[in-house]
Image: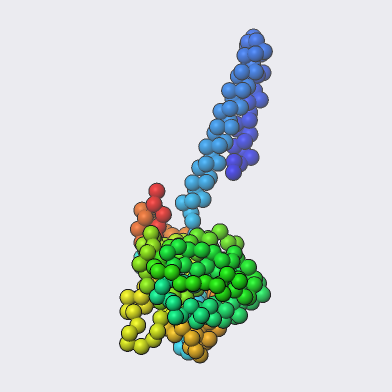
């Protein structure tokens, strides 16, 4: 915005121009023309300054981190203060700009794999989605997607705790566009007002059809501030797909989320209960990077707690914007 002082500086010649023209004996039309030119110059300069303000805002983007702090038993640690955290980017300590620790609503995107490899696991996937929805609070919202060769949103963000009717008629189809599904969910979450955002992936991790790379999908999730929780829906045992498990683990670990190895049973129930709790009670930290180069490079982030008996789980970094 333009300051009052700047406005006066530019308005003064506008108001003075016609008077000077008349005193010098110029015709009225010339005076009006002089006034119009001065006004146009002012508006142009005003627009330029507004544009400059926009550039400044872009260059001072905050990096926002949702951090989960756990004790040695894996339980959430409440009551920590601003001074209990230190943030490092590429090894350089950063100045914490904002800190919040209050309970706050979150938005979740649930992705159900409906590719061919999930044919015998689809009912289990629906059950897992329902169990996760059951753990949400009244103020939380969730959207439901399914993905195979394409990604479809079955339900927009809503406080509903049941799956849409379409979910019960799903059939599996050939290939798996997992990366595309994560990217779509991340972009939709980025439009939400909730500060805390999550993507729940219910899949065997078999990626073989996406247009987007795993790095691009993860970048979009990080830019949206979305934490990814990945549940491996494939059969357990020695025949489990190692590559698929690795894909799911990578998405969860780099975004600061959890990888859940079991598609059912007590482990899944306990994991979902913990996920719902931490999403509602995370610490939200933000800083303005000391390195303001817009070079598109990966920046590694490390959050260190002030206590030795706790661990912090958050995203591992972000990719700087590129000008």
Q: How is the image coloured?
A: rainbow
x then y, percent, for residue 142? 58, 70
* Residue in front for this viewpoint, 19 or 264: 264
Residue 30 visible within the image: yes
x then y, percent, for residue 41? 56, 28
* Residue in front for this viewpoint, 170 or 80: 170
x then y, percent, for residue 65? 49, 68
Q: How many marks?
A: 0
Specify the quadrant of the image occupied by residue 6. Answer: top right
Report whether 286 appears left or right of 137. Answer: left
Residue at the image position 55 percent from the left and 72 percent from the top: 169
Specify the quadrant of the image occupied by residue 36. Answer: top right
Please tell me whether residue 97 is drawn above or below residue 19 in the rendered image.
Answer: below
Residue at the image position 39 percent from the left and 52 percent from the top: 322
Report whether 223 appears left or right of 295. Answer: right
Residue at the image position 63 percent from the left and 22 percent from the top: 35
Report whether 68 appears left or right of 34. Answer: left
């Amino acid at each position: 915005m333009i300051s009052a002082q700047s406005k006066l500086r530019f308005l003064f010649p506008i108001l003075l121009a016609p008077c000077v023209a008349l005193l010098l004996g110029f015709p009225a039309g010339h005076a009006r023309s002089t006034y119009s030119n001065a006004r146009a110059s002012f508006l142009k300069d005003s627009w330029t300054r507004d544009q400059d303000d926009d550039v400044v805002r872009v260059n001072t983007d905050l990096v926002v981190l949702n951090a989960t702090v756990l004790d040695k038993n894996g339980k959430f640690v409440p009551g920590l203060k601003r001074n209990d955290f230190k943030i490092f980017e590429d090894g350089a300590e950063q100045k914490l700009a904002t800190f919040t620790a209050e309970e706050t609503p979150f938005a979740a995107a649930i992705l159900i794999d409906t590719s061919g490899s999930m044919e015998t696991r689809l009912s289990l996937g629906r059950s897992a989605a329902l169990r996760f929805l059951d753990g949400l609070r009244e103020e939380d919202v969730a959207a439901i997607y399914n993905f195979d060769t394409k990604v479809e949103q079955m339900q927009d963000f809503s406080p509903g705790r049941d799956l849409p009717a379409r979910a019960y008629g799903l059939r599996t189809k050939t290939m798996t566009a997992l990366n595309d599904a994560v990217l779509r969910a991340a972009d939709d979450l980025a439009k939400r007002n909730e500060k805390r955002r999550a993507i729940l992936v219910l899949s065997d991790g078999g990626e073989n059809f996406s247009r987007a790379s795993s790095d691009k999908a993860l970048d979009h999730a990080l830019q949206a501030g979305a934490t990814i929780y990945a549940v491996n829906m494939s059969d357990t045992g020695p025949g489990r797909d190692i590559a698929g498990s690795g894909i799911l683990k990578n998405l969860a670990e780099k975004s600061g989320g959890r990888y859940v190895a079991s598609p059912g049973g007590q482990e899944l129930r306990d994991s979902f209960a913990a996920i719902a709790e931490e999403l509602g009670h995370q610490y939200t930290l933000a800083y303005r990077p000391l390195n303001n180069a817009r070079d598109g490079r990966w920046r590694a982030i490390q959050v260190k707690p002030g206590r030795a008996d706790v661990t912090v789980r958050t995203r591992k970094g972000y990719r700087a914007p590129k000008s």
